[in-house]
Image (cartoon, coloured by chain):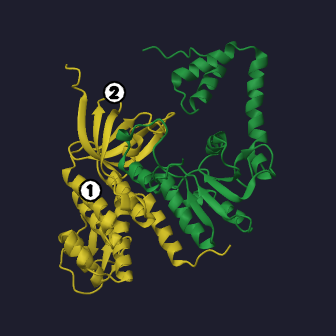
Amino acid sequence: MNEAIPTTAAPLARLIDEFYKLPGIGPKSAQRLAYYLLRMPPVEAQALAAAILEVKEKVGLCSICQNVTETDPCRICSSRERDRSIICIVEEPLDILAIERAQSYRGLYHVLHGAISPIDGIGPEDLKIADLLNRLRSDEVREIILATNPNLEGEATAMYLTRLLRPLGLKVTRLARGLPVGGDLEYADDVTLARALEGRQEMDG
Amino acid sequence: MPLNARLYKTEAIILRQRRLGEADRILTLLTPALGKMEAKAKGVRKTTSRMSGHLQPLTRCLLQLVQGRTADVITGCETMDSFQQLRQDLDRLSRALYVAELTDRLLPEKVTAYTSYRLLLDTLRRLDQADDIDVVLRYFEMRLLDQSGFLPQLDACVNCSSPLAPEQNFFVPQAGGTVCRSCVPGLAGPRPLSLNALKVLRLLQRGSYNDVARVKMQPDLAQETEHHLRSFIVTILERDVNSAAFIERLRREDQRQPLEV
Protein backbone atom coordinates (compact mmCIF):
# COMPACT_ATOMS: atom_id res chain seq x y z
CA MET A 1 0.00 0.00 0.00
CA ASN A 2 1.19 3.47 -0.86
CA GLU A 3 1.13 6.20 1.74
CA ALA A 4 -2.08 8.12 1.16
CA ILE A 5 -1.20 11.36 -0.64
CA PRO A 6 -3.45 14.21 0.44
CA THR A 7 -5.26 15.26 -2.71
CA THR A 8 -7.02 18.30 -1.25
CA ALA A 9 -5.17 21.52 -0.43
CA ALA A 10 -4.98 21.98 3.36
CA PRO A 11 -7.11 25.17 3.60
CA LEU A 12 -9.79 23.56 1.45
CA ALA A 13 -9.77 20.43 3.59
CA ARG A 14 -10.20 22.63 6.66
CA LEU A 15 -13.22 24.35 5.09
CA ILE A 16 -14.75 20.98 4.20
CA ASP A 17 -14.29 19.88 7.83
CA GLU A 18 -16.05 23.01 9.07
CA PHE A 19 -19.04 22.51 6.76
CA TYR A 20 -19.23 18.86 7.78
CA LYS A 21 -19.92 19.95 11.38
CA LEU A 22 -23.13 21.72 10.32
CA PRO A 23 -26.47 19.95 10.82
CA GLY A 24 -27.78 18.05 7.81
CA ILE A 25 -24.48 18.34 5.91
CA GLY A 26 -22.83 15.06 4.95
CA PRO A 27 -19.29 14.59 3.59
CA LYS A 28 -20.35 14.99 -0.06
CA SER A 29 -22.41 18.14 0.56
CA ALA A 30 -19.51 19.57 2.57
CA GLN A 31 -17.16 19.04 -0.38
CA ARG A 32 -19.65 20.51 -2.84
CA LEU A 33 -20.16 23.64 -0.72
CA ALA A 34 -16.42 24.14 -0.21
CA TYR A 35 -15.65 23.84 -3.94
CA TYR A 36 -18.53 26.18 -4.70
CA LEU A 37 -17.06 28.79 -2.35
CA LEU A 38 -13.66 28.32 -3.96
CA ARG A 39 -15.06 29.37 -7.34
CA MET A 40 -17.10 32.24 -5.89
CA PRO A 41 -16.06 35.87 -6.62
CA PRO A 42 -13.97 37.15 -3.63
CA VAL A 43 -16.56 39.88 -2.84
CA GLU A 44 -19.33 37.37 -2.30
CA ALA A 45 -17.13 35.13 -0.18
CA GLN A 46 -16.20 38.12 1.97
CA ALA A 47 -19.87 39.07 2.34
CA LEU A 48 -20.62 35.54 3.58
CA ALA A 49 -17.72 35.60 6.03
CA ALA A 50 -18.78 39.04 7.29
CA ALA A 51 -22.38 37.89 7.72
CA ILE A 52 -21.25 34.95 9.84
CA LEU A 53 -19.08 37.19 12.04
CA GLU A 54 -21.78 39.81 12.36
CA VAL A 55 -24.39 37.31 13.46
CA LYS A 56 -22.10 36.08 16.21
CA GLU A 57 -21.22 39.62 17.31
CA LYS A 58 -24.54 41.44 17.14
CA VAL A 59 -27.25 38.90 17.72
CA GLY A 60 -27.96 37.85 21.28
CA LEU A 61 -30.86 36.89 23.48
CA CYS A 62 -33.52 39.39 24.55
CA SER A 63 -33.12 39.91 28.30
CA ILE A 64 -36.90 39.74 28.73
CA CYS A 65 -38.28 37.01 26.47
CA GLN A 66 -35.01 35.18 25.59
CA ASN A 67 -35.78 35.34 21.86
CA VAL A 68 -32.85 35.94 19.50
CA THR A 69 -32.56 39.64 18.72
CA GLU A 70 -30.18 42.40 17.66
CA THR A 71 -31.75 44.99 19.94
CA ASP A 72 -32.31 44.45 23.65
CA PRO A 73 -35.20 44.34 24.56
CA CYS A 74 -36.38 42.78 21.30
CA ARG A 75 -38.92 44.39 18.96
CA ILE A 76 -41.84 42.44 20.31
CA CYS A 77 -41.03 43.15 23.96
CA SER A 78 -40.54 46.88 23.29
CA SER A 79 -43.59 47.28 21.03
CA ARG A 80 -46.44 49.44 22.38
CA GLU A 81 -49.02 47.61 20.31
CA ARG A 82 -48.53 44.30 22.08
CA ASP A 83 -50.86 43.07 24.83
CA ARG A 84 -48.65 42.88 27.93
CA SER A 85 -51.09 40.86 30.00
CA ILE A 86 -50.50 37.64 28.10
CA ILE A 87 -47.35 35.57 27.55
CA CYS A 88 -47.06 32.71 25.09
CA ILE A 89 -44.41 30.14 26.07
CA VAL A 90 -42.58 28.35 23.25
CA GLU A 91 -39.70 25.89 23.05
CA GLU A 92 -37.58 27.52 20.32
CA PRO A 93 -37.22 30.95 18.66
CA LEU A 94 -38.41 29.42 15.38
CA ASP A 95 -41.77 28.70 17.04
CA ILE A 96 -42.29 32.46 17.43
CA LEU A 97 -41.86 32.90 13.67
CA ALA A 98 -44.53 30.24 13.10
CA ILE A 99 -47.02 31.86 15.48
CA GLU A 100 -46.34 35.36 14.10
CA ARG A 101 -47.00 34.02 10.61
CA ALA A 102 -50.51 33.03 11.71
CA GLN A 103 -51.14 36.73 12.52
CA SER A 104 -53.70 36.06 15.23
CA TYR A 105 -51.67 36.57 18.41
CA ARG A 106 -50.87 40.04 19.79
CA GLY A 107 -49.34 39.24 23.16
CA LEU A 108 -45.76 38.68 24.31
CA TYR A 109 -43.58 35.56 24.17
CA HIS A 110 -41.13 33.62 26.29
CA VAL A 111 -38.62 31.18 24.77
CA LEU A 112 -37.57 28.21 26.94
CA HIS A 113 -34.78 27.06 24.60
CA GLY A 114 -35.71 23.41 24.83
CA ALA A 115 -38.14 21.03 26.49
CA ILE A 116 -37.92 18.76 29.51
CA SER A 117 -36.57 15.36 28.45
CA PRO A 118 -35.70 13.34 31.56
CA ILE A 119 -34.21 10.39 29.63
CA ASP A 120 -31.73 12.70 27.91
CA GLY A 121 -30.92 14.37 31.22
CA ILE A 122 -32.59 17.67 30.28
CA GLY A 123 -34.43 18.94 33.34
CA PRO A 124 -36.25 22.18 34.25
CA GLU A 125 -32.94 23.72 35.37
CA ASP A 126 -31.66 23.57 31.76
CA LEU A 127 -34.52 25.75 30.48
CA LYS A 128 -35.17 29.49 30.83
CA ILE A 129 -37.75 28.96 33.56
CA ALA A 130 -36.17 31.15 36.25
CA ASP A 131 -36.27 34.10 33.80
CA LEU A 132 -39.95 33.43 33.25
CA LEU A 133 -40.69 33.46 36.98
CA ASN A 134 -38.84 36.76 37.26
CA ARG A 135 -41.06 38.26 34.58
CA LEU A 136 -44.15 37.26 36.53
CA ARG A 137 -43.17 39.39 39.51
CA SER A 138 -45.03 42.32 38.01
CA ASP A 139 -48.83 42.29 38.16
CA GLU A 140 -49.23 42.97 34.46
CA VAL A 141 -49.47 39.34 33.38
CA ARG A 142 -52.91 37.70 33.58
CA GLU A 143 -52.60 34.71 31.25
CA ILE A 144 -49.92 32.23 30.23
CA ILE A 145 -50.37 30.25 27.01
CA LEU A 146 -48.37 27.02 26.93
CA ALA A 147 -47.36 26.54 23.30
CA THR A 148 -44.78 23.77 23.69
CA ASN A 149 -44.84 21.03 21.06
CA PRO A 150 -47.65 18.47 21.33
CA ASN A 151 -45.20 15.59 21.80
CA LEU A 152 -44.04 13.77 24.90
CA GLU A 153 -41.34 16.29 25.88
CA GLY A 154 -43.56 19.28 25.15
CA GLU A 155 -46.42 17.80 27.20
CA ALA A 156 -44.09 17.03 30.10
CA THR A 157 -42.85 20.63 29.99
CA ALA A 158 -46.40 22.00 29.86
CA MET A 159 -47.48 19.86 32.82
CA TYR A 160 -44.43 20.89 34.82
CA LEU A 161 -45.03 24.60 34.14
CA THR A 162 -48.70 24.24 35.03
CA ARG A 163 -47.70 22.89 38.46
CA LEU A 164 -45.36 25.82 38.90
CA LEU A 165 -47.68 28.58 37.66
CA ARG A 166 -51.13 27.56 38.92
CA PRO A 167 -50.38 28.49 42.55
CA LEU A 168 -49.52 32.02 41.38
CA GLY A 169 -53.17 32.64 40.50
CA LEU A 170 -52.58 33.08 36.78
CA LYS A 171 -54.82 31.77 34.05
CA VAL A 172 -52.80 28.96 32.43
CA THR A 173 -53.98 27.76 29.02
CA ARG A 174 -52.66 25.21 26.54
CA LEU A 175 -52.87 25.40 22.74
CA ALA A 176 -55.70 23.15 21.54
CA ARG A 177 -54.79 19.78 20.14
CA GLY A 178 -56.87 18.26 17.41
CA LEU A 179 -57.05 17.39 13.76
CA PRO A 180 -54.69 19.16 11.38
CA VAL A 181 -56.12 21.12 8.45
CA GLY A 182 -55.98 18.96 5.34
CA GLY A 183 -55.69 15.73 7.36
CA ASP A 184 -57.68 12.49 7.18
CA LEU A 185 -59.79 11.35 10.13
CA GLU A 186 -59.03 7.68 9.52
CA TYR A 187 -55.32 8.21 10.09
CA ALA A 188 -55.70 10.10 13.36
CA ASP A 189 -54.30 8.46 16.50
CA ASP A 190 -56.34 7.84 19.68
CA VAL A 191 -54.83 10.67 21.68
CA THR A 192 -55.46 13.29 19.00
CA LEU A 193 -59.00 12.04 18.38
CA ALA A 194 -59.82 12.00 22.09
CA ARG A 195 -58.55 15.58 22.46
CA ALA A 196 -60.40 16.69 19.33
CA LEU A 197 -63.65 15.29 20.73
CA GLU A 198 -63.05 16.93 24.11
CA GLY A 199 -62.39 20.25 22.43
CA ARG A 200 -65.27 20.11 19.91
CA GLN A 201 -67.07 23.37 19.28
CA GLU A 202 -70.56 24.38 18.30
CA MET A 203 -70.89 25.39 14.65
CA ASP A 204 -71.67 29.04 14.05
CA GLY A 205 -74.50 30.21 11.82
CA MET B 1 -36.37 -12.52 -4.01
CA PRO B 2 -40.04 -11.57 -3.90
CA LEU B 3 -40.73 -7.88 -3.75
CA ASN B 4 -42.02 -7.87 -0.17
CA ALA B 5 -39.42 -10.16 1.39
CA ARG B 6 -37.89 -7.20 3.19
CA LEU B 7 -41.24 -6.13 4.62
CA TYR B 8 -42.28 -7.33 8.09
CA LYS B 9 -44.71 -6.55 10.90
CA THR B 10 -44.17 -6.49 14.62
CA GLU B 11 -45.71 -5.24 17.80
CA ALA B 12 -43.50 -2.74 19.65
CA ILE B 13 -43.32 -0.35 22.57
CA ILE B 14 -41.48 2.89 21.83
CA LEU B 15 -38.82 3.59 24.44
CA ARG B 16 -37.25 6.81 23.26
CA GLN B 17 -36.63 8.94 20.21
CA ARG B 18 -34.07 11.28 18.82
CA ARG B 19 -34.18 13.74 15.97
CA LEU B 20 -32.60 12.97 12.64
CA GLY B 21 -32.15 15.49 9.84
CA GLU B 22 -34.93 17.86 8.85
CA ALA B 23 -38.09 15.95 9.78
CA ASP B 24 -37.14 12.36 10.69
CA ARG B 25 -36.68 10.53 13.95
CA ILE B 26 -34.77 7.47 15.07
CA LEU B 27 -36.87 5.46 17.50
CA THR B 28 -35.62 2.93 20.02
CA LEU B 29 -38.18 0.12 20.23
CA LEU B 30 -38.70 -2.95 22.33
CA THR B 31 -40.28 -5.80 20.38
CA PRO B 32 -41.08 -9.31 21.66
CA ALA B 33 -39.29 -11.36 19.00
CA LEU B 34 -36.59 -8.98 17.77
CA GLY B 35 -35.73 -7.50 21.15
CA LYS B 36 -34.48 -3.96 21.48
CA MET B 37 -33.90 -2.30 18.11
CA GLU B 38 -33.71 1.04 16.35
CA ALA B 39 -35.93 2.09 13.47
CA LYS B 40 -36.20 5.17 11.33
CA ALA B 41 -39.50 7.08 11.12
CA LYS B 42 -39.48 9.42 8.14
CA GLY B 43 -41.21 12.78 8.06
CA VAL B 44 -42.81 12.38 11.51
CA ARG B 45 -41.86 15.87 12.69
CA LYS B 46 -44.12 17.50 10.09
CA THR B 47 -47.65 18.32 11.24
CA THR B 48 -49.00 16.55 8.16
CA SER B 49 -47.44 13.21 9.16
CA ARG B 50 -50.02 10.46 9.52
CA MET B 51 -47.71 8.45 11.73
CA SER B 52 -46.40 10.93 14.29
CA GLY B 53 -49.32 10.56 16.71
CA HIS B 54 -48.86 6.80 16.77
CA LEU B 55 -45.12 6.93 17.28
CA GLN B 56 -44.77 8.87 20.54
CA PRO B 57 -42.57 7.30 23.23
CA LEU B 58 -44.45 5.03 25.69
CA THR B 59 -46.93 3.93 23.03
CA ARG B 60 -47.61 0.30 22.22
CA CYS B 61 -48.22 -0.09 18.53
CA LEU B 62 -48.34 -2.43 15.58
CA LEU B 63 -45.62 -1.53 13.11
CA GLN B 64 -44.88 -2.36 9.52
CA LEU B 65 -41.20 -2.02 8.66
CA VAL B 66 -38.91 -2.40 5.67
CA GLN B 67 -35.38 -3.66 6.18
CA GLY B 68 -32.91 -0.92 5.40
CA ARG B 69 -29.17 -0.78 5.01
CA THR B 70 -28.43 0.90 8.34
CA ALA B 71 -31.76 1.01 10.20
CA ASP B 72 -35.14 -0.47 9.30
CA VAL B 73 -37.72 2.08 8.17
CA ILE B 74 -41.24 2.29 9.57
CA THR B 75 -43.81 2.36 6.76
CA GLY B 76 -47.00 1.94 8.70
CA CYS B 77 -48.24 1.97 12.26
CA GLU B 78 -51.31 1.75 14.40
CA THR B 79 -51.67 2.45 18.13
CA MET B 80 -52.64 -0.54 20.28
CA ASP B 81 -52.34 1.17 23.65
CA SER B 82 -51.53 4.81 24.35
CA PHE B 83 -51.74 4.74 28.19
CA GLN B 84 -53.64 8.03 28.33
CA GLN B 85 -53.83 8.37 32.12
CA LEU B 86 -50.08 8.03 32.31
CA ARG B 87 -49.58 10.80 29.78
CA GLN B 88 -51.73 13.32 31.62
CA ASP B 89 -50.08 13.01 35.02
CA LEU B 90 -46.52 14.22 35.48
CA ASP B 91 -45.82 11.86 38.42
CA ARG B 92 -46.87 8.82 36.41
CA LEU B 93 -45.16 10.06 33.25
CA SER B 94 -41.82 10.66 35.00
CA ARG B 95 -41.88 7.07 36.36
CA ALA B 96 -42.78 5.66 32.94
CA LEU B 97 -39.83 7.49 31.39
CA TYR B 98 -37.58 5.99 34.07
CA VAL B 99 -38.91 2.54 33.14
CA ALA B 100 -38.20 3.21 29.46
CA GLU B 101 -34.68 4.43 30.20
CA LEU B 102 -33.80 1.39 32.35
CA THR B 103 -35.18 -0.99 29.72
CA ASP B 104 -33.07 0.74 27.07
CA ARG B 105 -29.92 0.67 29.18
CA LEU B 106 -30.13 -2.84 30.64
CA LEU B 107 -31.30 -4.91 27.67
CA PRO B 108 -28.93 -5.90 24.84
CA GLU B 109 -29.75 -5.06 21.24
CA LYS B 110 -31.46 -7.57 18.94
CA VAL B 111 -31.87 -10.37 21.47
CA THR B 112 -35.33 -11.94 21.75
CA ALA B 113 -37.12 -10.33 24.69
CA TYR B 114 -40.54 -11.93 25.21
CA THR B 115 -40.41 -11.82 29.02
CA SER B 116 -39.01 -8.28 29.19
CA TYR B 117 -41.63 -7.09 26.70
CA ARG B 118 -44.36 -8.60 28.85
CA LEU B 119 -42.83 -6.97 31.94
CA LEU B 120 -42.63 -3.56 30.27
CA LEU B 121 -46.22 -3.77 29.05
CA ASP B 122 -47.51 -4.86 32.48
CA THR B 123 -45.50 -2.09 34.15
CA LEU B 124 -46.83 0.64 31.86
CA ARG B 125 -50.39 -0.61 32.47
CA ARG B 126 -49.79 -0.52 36.21
CA LEU B 127 -48.29 2.97 36.05
CA ASP B 128 -51.40 3.98 34.09
CA GLN B 129 -53.74 2.71 36.81
CA ALA B 130 -52.08 1.77 40.12
CA ASP B 131 -52.32 3.89 43.27
CA ASP B 132 -48.80 3.31 44.58
CA ILE B 133 -46.68 3.98 41.50
CA ASP B 134 -43.37 3.70 43.36
CA VAL B 135 -44.03 0.08 44.32
CA VAL B 136 -44.66 -0.59 40.61
CA LEU B 137 -41.16 0.76 39.93
CA ARG B 138 -39.47 -1.35 42.62
CA TYR B 139 -41.09 -4.53 41.31
CA PHE B 140 -40.08 -3.61 37.76
CA GLU B 141 -36.47 -2.90 38.77
CA MET B 142 -36.06 -6.26 40.51
CA ARG B 143 -37.68 -8.22 37.65
CA LEU B 144 -35.64 -6.45 34.98
CA LEU B 145 -32.42 -7.07 36.95
CA ASP B 146 -33.41 -10.74 37.09
CA GLN B 147 -34.16 -10.92 33.35
CA SER B 148 -30.93 -9.20 32.38
CA GLY B 149 -28.84 -11.46 34.61
CA PHE B 150 -28.02 -9.07 37.43
CA LEU B 151 -30.21 -10.36 40.25
CA PRO B 152 -28.70 -9.31 43.62
CA GLN B 153 -27.89 -12.10 46.07
CA LEU B 154 -30.15 -11.66 49.12
CA ASP B 155 -30.28 -15.14 50.68
CA ALA B 156 -26.92 -15.24 52.36
CA CYS B 157 -23.72 -13.23 52.79
CA VAL B 158 -22.02 -12.95 49.39
CA ASN B 159 -18.65 -13.22 51.11
CA CYS B 160 -18.91 -16.16 53.55
CA SER B 161 -22.18 -17.73 52.31
CA SER B 162 -23.50 -18.01 55.84
CA PRO B 163 -27.20 -17.22 56.32
CA LEU B 164 -27.98 -13.68 57.47
CA ALA B 165 -28.87 -13.16 61.11
CA PRO B 166 -32.24 -11.43 61.73
CA GLU B 167 -30.63 -8.07 62.52
CA GLN B 168 -29.20 -5.12 60.64
CA ASN B 169 -26.93 -6.38 57.85
CA PHE B 170 -25.28 -4.63 54.93
CA PHE B 171 -25.99 -4.27 51.23
CA VAL B 172 -22.87 -3.94 49.08
CA PRO B 173 -23.70 -3.20 45.42
CA GLN B 174 -20.10 -3.75 44.25
CA ALA B 175 -20.10 -7.23 45.85
CA GLY B 176 -23.44 -8.14 44.27
CA GLY B 177 -25.70 -8.39 47.31
CA THR B 178 -26.00 -8.73 51.08
CA VAL B 179 -23.04 -9.00 53.43
CA CYS B 180 -23.09 -10.06 57.10
CA ARG B 181 -21.66 -7.97 59.95
CA SER B 182 -18.44 -9.95 60.32
CA CYS B 183 -17.53 -9.76 56.61
CA VAL B 184 -18.24 -6.05 56.08
CA PRO B 185 -14.92 -4.56 57.27
CA GLY B 186 -12.65 -4.09 54.28
CA LEU B 187 -15.43 -4.06 51.64
CA ALA B 188 -15.98 -0.94 49.53
CA GLY B 189 -19.30 0.93 49.70
CA PRO B 190 -21.28 -0.97 52.35
CA ARG B 191 -24.81 0.35 52.98
CA PRO B 192 -26.59 -0.48 56.25
CA LEU B 193 -29.58 -2.69 55.45
CA SER B 194 -32.46 -2.82 57.94
CA LEU B 195 -34.20 -6.10 58.56
CA ASN B 196 -37.47 -4.76 57.16
CA ALA B 197 -35.78 -3.54 53.96
CA LEU B 198 -34.19 -6.98 53.54
CA LYS B 199 -37.65 -8.57 53.85
CA VAL B 200 -39.06 -6.17 51.25
CA LEU B 201 -36.18 -6.82 48.84
CA ARG B 202 -36.66 -10.58 49.22
CA LEU B 203 -40.38 -10.23 48.61
CA LEU B 204 -39.66 -8.18 45.48
CA GLN B 205 -37.35 -10.95 44.32
CA ARG B 206 -39.66 -13.89 44.95
CA GLY B 207 -43.21 -12.61 45.17
CA SER B 208 -45.69 -11.81 42.44
CA TYR B 209 -46.72 -8.22 41.75
CA ASN B 210 -49.95 -8.79 43.66
CA ASP B 211 -48.00 -9.96 46.73
CA VAL B 212 -45.84 -6.85 46.56
CA ALA B 213 -48.74 -4.46 45.92
CA ARG B 214 -50.46 -5.64 49.10
CA VAL B 215 -47.59 -4.45 51.32
CA LYS B 216 -48.10 -0.97 52.76
CA MET B 217 -44.67 0.53 53.34
CA GLN B 218 -43.86 3.46 55.61
CA PRO B 219 -42.14 6.32 53.74
CA ASP B 220 -38.67 5.69 55.22
CA LEU B 221 -38.81 1.96 54.43
CA ALA B 222 -39.93 2.73 50.86
CA GLN B 223 -37.08 5.22 50.59
CA GLU B 224 -34.48 2.78 51.95
CA THR B 225 -35.59 0.07 49.52
CA GLU B 226 -35.48 2.54 46.65
CA HIS B 227 -31.96 3.73 47.54
CA HIS B 228 -30.57 0.18 47.77
CA LEU B 229 -32.00 -0.84 44.42
CA ARG B 230 -30.92 2.43 42.79
CA SER B 231 -27.34 2.10 44.05
CA PHE B 232 -27.25 -1.47 42.72
CA ILE B 233 -28.50 -0.33 39.29
CA VAL B 234 -26.05 2.58 39.15
CA THR B 235 -23.22 0.17 40.00
CA ILE B 236 -24.20 -2.16 37.16
CA LEU B 237 -24.71 0.61 34.61
CA GLU B 238 -21.61 2.48 35.80
CA ARG B 239 -23.60 5.67 35.39
CA ASP B 240 -26.59 7.54 36.82
CA VAL B 241 -30.09 6.98 35.53
CA ASN B 242 -30.98 10.38 34.01
CA SER B 243 -34.73 10.27 34.59
CA ALA B 244 -34.29 9.44 38.30
CA ALA B 245 -33.11 13.02 38.85
CA PHE B 246 -36.40 14.36 37.47
CA ILE B 247 -38.46 12.10 39.76
CA GLU B 248 -36.42 13.40 42.71
CA ARG B 249 -37.02 16.97 41.68
CA LEU B 250 -40.78 16.49 41.41
CA ARG B 251 -40.81 14.98 44.89
CA ARG B 252 -38.80 17.88 46.32
CA GLU B 253 -41.02 20.50 44.74
CA ASP B 254 -44.11 18.68 45.90
CA GLN B 255 -43.05 19.02 49.50
CA ARG B 256 -42.14 22.67 49.22
CA GLN B 257 -44.56 25.50 49.81
CA PRO B 258 -45.92 27.21 46.68
CA LEU B 259 -43.46 29.73 45.24
CA GLU B 260 -43.60 33.31 46.40
CA VAL B 261 -43.56 35.73 43.52
Q: Where is residue B159 shown, x and y percent of the image?
A: 24, 72
Q: Which chain is disc 2 placed on?
A: B
Q: Is residue B151 left or right of residue A82?
A: left
Residue B121, numbered circle: 1
The three-letter code of the residue at mark 1 reads Leu
Which residue is painted at 74% across and 37% down in the image? A55
Residue B237, numbered circle: none
Residue B69, numbered circle: 2
Q: Residues within 10 Å of mark 2 (few under 14, many from 20)?
A: few
Of A94 and B169, nearer the camera is A94
Q: State the SS at label 2.
A: loop
Chain (yellow): B
The three-letter code of the residue at mark 2 reads Arg
Q: Where, quadrant-wise, is the N terminus of chain A in this rendering? A: top left
Q: State the SS at label 1.
A: helix
For residue B151, say whether it is visible. Answer: yes
Query: Earlier along the polypeptide chain: callout 1 or callout 2?
Result: 2
Q: Nearer the viewer, mark 1 or mark 2?
A: 1
Which residue is painted at 52% across and 56% down in the image? A116
Chain (green): A
Of B113 and B170, nearer the camera is B113
For residue B98, say whether it is visible. Answer: no
